[in-house]
Image (cartoon, rainbow, N blue to C red):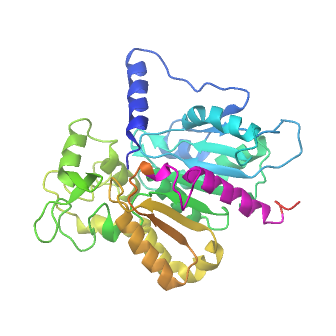
Amino acid sequence: MRYSLTFLTSLLFLASVRSQGRTYRFQETERVKLFEIKSKFLSEFWGREIRMQAGVVLPTGWTARSTRRWPICYNVHGFGGSHMAAMRHGRQLTRDMDAGKYPRMLYVFLNASSPQGHHEFADSVNNGPRGKALIEEFIPALEKKFHAVAKAEGRFLTGHSSGGWSSFWLQITYPDFFGGTWSTAPDSVDFRDFTGINIYEWKNAYTDPDGKPIPLVRRGKRWVATIKQYVEKELSRRSFGGQFSSFDYVFSPRGEDGRPMPMFNRKTGLIDPKVAKAWEKYDIRLILHRNWKTLGPSLQGKLRIYVGTLDTYRLEGAAILLKKELAQLGSDANILLVPGRSHSSLFRPHKEYWPKGMMYRIHSEMLDRFHSTKSGGE
């Protein structure tokens, strides 16, 4: 779902710059680099050149000629973001690493944005082989150029919101490729609570079985918008590329008109049961439930979710259901529900969980995990 108000404000600024006829470009520095390649897989799917990008923040001590190999953190932005995040965070990251106050590793900010919205790095009939291109083309090329460890034990994931879902999806889809995910406030990881909707059992995405409007957005403990109101506002701006349209592009079958079939009718809210059934392919809880015997051993110690109990877009509900499922499966996953935190306040320092901020804890745990491995101990 959406990022914080501050982040949205920056996006509006970028849109303003483009509207004035100027092009907003990635500005490289000595320690912040753009990495970009043409994807053969995606170009063949779309019938035109498709390029993949990331912003890379280099750690203290990195040089092009060094033989040292570095662990790497792959960060996936939320809806509306891009790899440009490397520019915003790079200066502070490098300053803190230089001062010895922050974990030293490669920080990679992937680009999951597209005209269709956020492609989630999931292979789909509408967006193409996004995951395959990332794993087989992009990451190997990036890790070679920037001297990464290039092994699962040094390859970690994190992401917020839609990026949180993406990072969790990548970990369970390629369990032996990555060494762990720290997913924050992920979009719904259990479609029995898809932002408040049980897509399998309910008939309508706007009203619950009792006929009451389903709330979606809240400020603190107060609901401020229903799903219907949210969708109506989205449609007033654009017909596709919005948040719910983005979900359809990732999860839905392709319709006769060449566009993804909507999971629910935007005017009436009626859920299409055939489309909902097709969404099972991307239901993380269901995938783990059905495949735990084969996935479980490879995911040991690798699954973490952090989400506030007052998430702005009610994403904690699906996380709670997944937490129960994983406990029943015997998983050692850590799904932490932070009392009173919202979608954006989750990042702020917490006296008990992360006194120096959530991301400091996440990156420190990544580096600690790397140092506990054979590669990290060398």
Residue farthest along the front direction in this orientation: 351
Q: Residue at x 43, y 49 (%)?
A: 345
Image position of 305 (left or right of 147): left
Magenta extent: 346-374
Residue 18, image x, y percentages: 42, 21
Closest to the observer: 234 or 161?
A: 161
Q: Is residue 257 visible?
A: yes
Closest to the observer: 198 or 116?
A: 198
Q: Is residue 129 visible?
A: no
Q: In the image, is residue 322 above or below residue 255?
A: below
Q: In the image, is residue 238 above or below residue 226?
A: above
Q: In the image, is residue 78 above or below residue 5?
A: below
Residue 372, image x, y percentages: 78, 66
The stretch drawn in magenta includes residue 372: yes
State how many labels appear. 0
Residue farthest along the left direction in this orientation: 211
